[in-house]
Amino acid sequence: MCGIIGYIGNKNAAEIVYGGLKRLEYRGYDSAGAAFRAEGKISVIKKEGKVEKLLPYLAGVRATVGIGHTRWATHGAPSDINAHPHSSGCISVVHNGIIENYAELKNLLISEGVTFLSRTDSEVIAHLINRFYSGDLVAAVAEAVKLLKGSYALMVICERENKIVAARYKSPLIIGFGQGENFCASDEPALAGKCEKISVLEDGDIAEITSDEVTIFNGELQCVVREVSPNLAVSSDLGLGDYPHYMLKEIGEVAGSVEYTLKAFGSVKVKLAAAFSGVTRVVLTGCGTAYHAALIGRRYIEIFAKIPAEAETAGEFRYKNPVLGEGCAVLAISQSGETADTVEAARLAKSSGAKVIAVTNCLRSELTRVADVVVPVAAGPEICVAATKSYTGQVAALYLAALTLAGVEGGGLWEELEKMPALCRETAENIDTSALARKCARSRGTYFLGRDLDYAVALEGSLKLKEVSYVPGEGYPAGELKHGTLALIDKRTVSVFIITDGKLAGKCENAVEQVLSRGGKVAVLTNLQDVKKRLKGLVTVIELPACGRLLSPLLSAVAVQKLAYDAAVILSRDPDKPRNLAKSVTVE
Ligand code: M6R
């Protein structure tokens, strides 16, 4: 959940490490730090707060070797002391992951006379490497990692050796190859524009990186070869352009996400159809927004393929001894492909004999290495912590997967999706949620309500608003309101109904009346003309373009995303970096 970057070459390491950390900041931003090696000495700078806090201290650094870290705190509160790098003797370390046996290791080290400065689990790594160091950094790292339980991506520098040593287990780490310079980072975007070739390290790998050479070893220190592939991250994709925030930019890219996902699906269609052969049951899993996409995908599978489908959050799924096996396909959905719970759920499914299908925006992520088939979500890099365009890409990918499972190879249902990019664009350009956002921002609480697919979008709307504006809220099935939650409704609450299903509209309108009778404020997002006519003047109506009910989530999602964005801006929150969060949750 943290981002790490390393550089060794002949350029200014401070500049490169800082630039990489800025790009990695979406992985965590409660504190940041860097260590540089120059003339046999290491200097460490670390600060609580966002990466830019480091900037004033970097001006004076003259070094060509450096490692950096941007943190999302797990063990130990955000503070200067708990920020990485952590040092011991001549060693400095940055770490992403969680050391589960850190308490035991810490006690051992304390009994040997080691003094700890921080409250982190990561500091044990620095002390362990220092304990094993006797002139060979690679050997010391190899010894130290043998004692670690949990997950780690590490970069280590040492005053006595002009190199970076990197190691990984269950946390992502890549090597970037340059000319007379080499890089190491948590992911490709950190190296956008810096190098053209990369290799992804595998679990247990240890890499020795100098400016001219990279040698990769396995845990027994035998040399191993890892595939070298092009660095797909392009720096121009990562700029903000004229937008004030990535969230707004990325809502504007929802149409492209659906369009490119549709195009990209052609490359996997045959393989997916083969993987689905003999499948009689589907489980969809993911976390947060990806789970909300799973709820929609489940309905597509039931509706098109008419086979049982369930959706479950990955964190629950992996610990409930799920009944899987032959005939079962598990669709693991994740923007990053690195979410620990989702990756572990996929591993569990695979080991239980199920077919595992990854639905992801990151085609070189851990999830893709576990899966039998990868269905691409072609949303492009998503920088804002709140998922927007990746959600609509996931919904489009799941729609296509469900059609494939049902053996529907073309025709009206495919054409419906082909029309959606234009409608998404129209929605993103024209939707005005600012007045409703002001009401939500002033409210004591918000309720997002809907039925069937609209309920799934209601859950996503509620998550989005909470996440970026910190306004409390709940997503609820509209029909359940009267069974308890109605007690919370008063004039200080705002209820946002999503009504796009003609068959269920009347039932939802009953719930609207129930809220109005209790003095609650109500807004309705709808693309149904008769609903609009009946409710206009009674509630705030936000109109969406007309489309079939099955794909309406692609449009109502844009509306709830824009609503959340507007509320965040009204309340002066940073929608791109909400407090306490990180984009990739690579720890449990
Ligand atoms: O990368 P993933 O799709 O696996 O991430 C899952 C969740 O952490 C993520 O969707 C989270 O809920 C978003 N920040 C919500 O906007």
Image: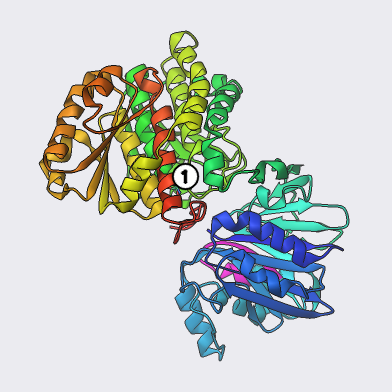
Residue 29 location (% of width, % of height): 54, 62
Residue hosting label 1: 347
Q: Which residues are magenta?
A: 144-156
289 lies above or below 224: above
Q: Residue furthest bottom?
A: 113
Residue 104 location (% of width, % of height): 46, 77
Q: Residue furthest top?
A: 411
Residue 97 location (% of width, % of height): 53, 62
Q: Residue furthest front?
A: 537
Badge 1 local density, few (<14 within 10 Å), some, or many (20+)? some
Residue 217 in view, yes or no: no
Residue 523 among magenta residues:
no
**Which amino acid, mark 1?**
Arg
Residue at left 49%, top 32%? 428
User: Is 546 placed left or right of 379 in the picture?
Assistant: left
Residue 522 in view, yes or no: yes
The quarter of the picture where the C terminus appears is: bottom left
